[in-house]
Amino acid sequence: MTMRDKAPFRADHVGSLLRSPALLEARARRQKGEIDDAELRAAEDVSIADAIRLQEDVGLEGITDGEHRRTLFHVDFMEKLDGITVSEGKLVSFHSHNEKLEFAPPTMGIGGRLRHVAPIQGADFDFLKSRTSRTPKVCIPSPSMAHFRVGRRGIPTDVYPDIEEFFDDLAAAYRAEIADLASRGCRYIQLDDTNLAYLCDPAVRQQVIAMGENPDELPHTYAKLINDSIKDRPDDMAVCIHLCRGNFKSAWVAEGGYDPVADAMFNEIAVDGFFLEYENERSGGFEPLRYVPKGKLVVLGLVSSKLAALESKDFLKSRIDQAAKHLDPDQMALSPQCGFSSTVHGNQITVEDQIAKLRLCVETAQEVWG
């Protein structure tokens, strides 16, 4: 076994990083109209430059902009597709280590035919690429995010009488965005997907049934959608998918092992790697890893991005050994289980905690894989 010189890397991370106080202040001032978009972007540039240095200093090879230009990991991207509408959302109950939190993320809907009308991440990628000599990584929401929250019932039949046309247009929009990123030199993309992980939770599966969808069919539907979305990518572009059970102020929504989606996910989705949450019992056991085919990598999210307590190297190595009963260690890598700030609010940890956790991933990966 050896360290890898291509993405996904043996020590990797999900992408989002805590926002700096200066950036949060700039965002608040922009909301009040005290500064304009250009001034906010200048503040973002400074914060992202610091985030890049942080990642390089701890030894990471895949470098993100920390999602410092976003409020929410998915909405900021999806709303730039023609046809996506955004409205006030309903309160969602999040599980927490301390208390139950409620948060109302905006609800995305379909108001017209879906189209990619302009580059979405292009300028952001250009800035990131210009600031690092390592591999710049772009994180975007999985295309399935446009369907899961609303289902067929939320997609107007006068716009899409045939649901297959909806999926075709959605995939075409993603292909256009990925083609633009590829033309700029992007060779590492991560699709953030809460839906497949939510389908592991019995309670959410019941909600899906109540919405008129079949939780057993959706993994196959989403596998086809994702494959159609990435099928024209360059041969040397790595695409990974991150499964998330919710991440807001260190709280989460869904629980349950990967068993209900593992076979379809690992064997039908044509990505290079899977970032899987595995930091505690809410993610189930490693047995579903037996479905992973040769040639695909699983990035084990064994380090919590939600809790400040730092895991030990011995603990992480013992967990890797447990996973190795079901998957060749050469098909594994290590990361935090989720981002540190999937929303602008950030998790209940400090920047020092964040640095220690990322450095722990790098050092442990070097000791395990060479």
Image (tube, helix red, strand yellow):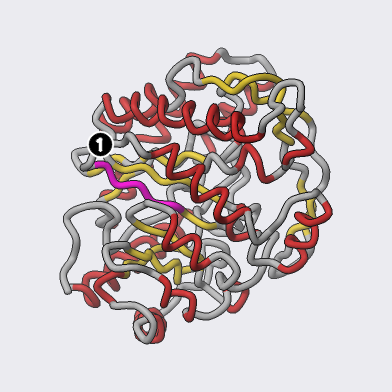
Quarter occupied by residue 90:
top right
Residue at x 28% of width, y 77% of height: 329
Q: Main secondary structure of the magenta part?
A: strand
Quarter occupied by residue 135:
top left
Residue at x 26% of width, y 49% of height: 56
Quarter occupied by residue 214:
bottom right
Image side of residue 46 versus residue 151, left or right: left
Q: Is residue 240 magenta?
A: yes
Residue 308 at x, y percent in the picture:
53, 67
Image side of residue 164 versus residue 233, left or right: right
Vertical comparison of 214 with 22: above or below: below
Vertical comparison of 240 with 86: above or below: below
Image side of residue 201 versus residue 238, left or right: right
Residue 324 at x, y percent in the picture:
34, 82
Which element type, helix, strand or loop, lies under badge 1?
Answer: loop
Image side of residue 104 versus residue 198, left or right: right
* Foreground residue among 138 and 114: 114
The segment highlighted magenta reads: 237-241
Vertical comparison of 187 with 123: above or below: below
Name the residue carrying label 1: 234
Residue 347 at x, y percent in the picture:
59, 55
